[in-house]
Amino acid sequence: MLKLNLSRLFNERGISQPCIYLIKHNIPRHTAQRILSGEHTHLHFTHVETLCKALVCTPNDLLEYIPDKEEGLLENHPLKALKRQSDHFNWLQKTAGIPLPELQQLINQINQQIHQKNSTEE
């Protein structure tokens, strides 16, 4: 079964109020509430595009594949690439114990990577 898994993306992006975030990105309130509650069974491509732009991701990042117990997909089936690992990476938790000078070095490295990426896109 394919499932929309936005909670993982919101956690990774540090978005604490997902409904407000979706509304600010032009997803109607009722649609945002249905998406977040898991009641939404289909999405318009415009909403998928809006979500991808807002969360800086691809449609594959929005979806998670949860295999049925009796489903007999081959090991190399492309849907298996959408099966997510359960470990969530919490940046704040992982960096909490890093001494400030090392943390600043890490921030500088990240900023360099962002600058390089932005330079190549222009």
Image: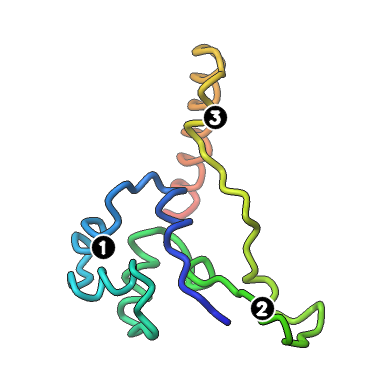
Residue 85, horizontal then vertical, whole percent: 65, 58
Q: Which mark is residue 109?
A: 3
Q: Could you say which quadrant of the image residue 73 lies in?
A: bottom right
Q: Which mark is residue 66?
A: none
Which of the two residues, 113 or 34, is positioned nearer the viewer here? 34
From the image, state whether disc 3 or disc 1 is nearer to you. Answer: 1
Pick whichever of labels 3 and 1 is earlier in the sequence: 1
Mark 1 burial class by Cα count in 10 Å: few <14, some 14-19, many 20+: many
Residue 71, horizontal then vertical, whole percent: 72, 87
Up/down of 47 relative to 109, above or below: below
Which of the two residues, 89 or 117, is positioned nearer the viewer here? 89
Q: Residue at x 66, y 78 (%)?
A: 67
Which quarter of the rendering shows the N terminus?
bottom right
Secondary structure found at label 2: loop
The residue carrying mark 1 is: 22
Mark 3 burial class by Cα count in 10 Å: few <14, some 14-19, many 20+: few
The amino acid on which the numbered mark 1 sits, given as a three-letter code, is Leu
The amino acid on which the numbered mark 3 sits, given as a three-letter code, is Gln
Q: Are marks 2 and 1 in contact (CB under 8 Å)?
A: no
Q: CA distance from mark 2 to mark 3?
A: 39 Å
Residue 46, horizontal then vertical, whole percent: 31, 80
Pick whichever of labels 2 and 3 is earlier in the sequence: 2
Left of 82 or right of it: where is 21? left
Secondary structure found at label 1: helix
Which quarter of the rendering shows the C terminus?
bottom left
Up/down of 114 relative to 22, above or below: above
Number of labels in the image equals 3
Pick whichever of labels 2 and 1 is earlier in the sequence: 1
Which of the two residues, 11 or 119, is positioned nearer the viewer here? 11
Secondary structure found at label 3: helix
Q: Which mark is residue 67?
A: 2
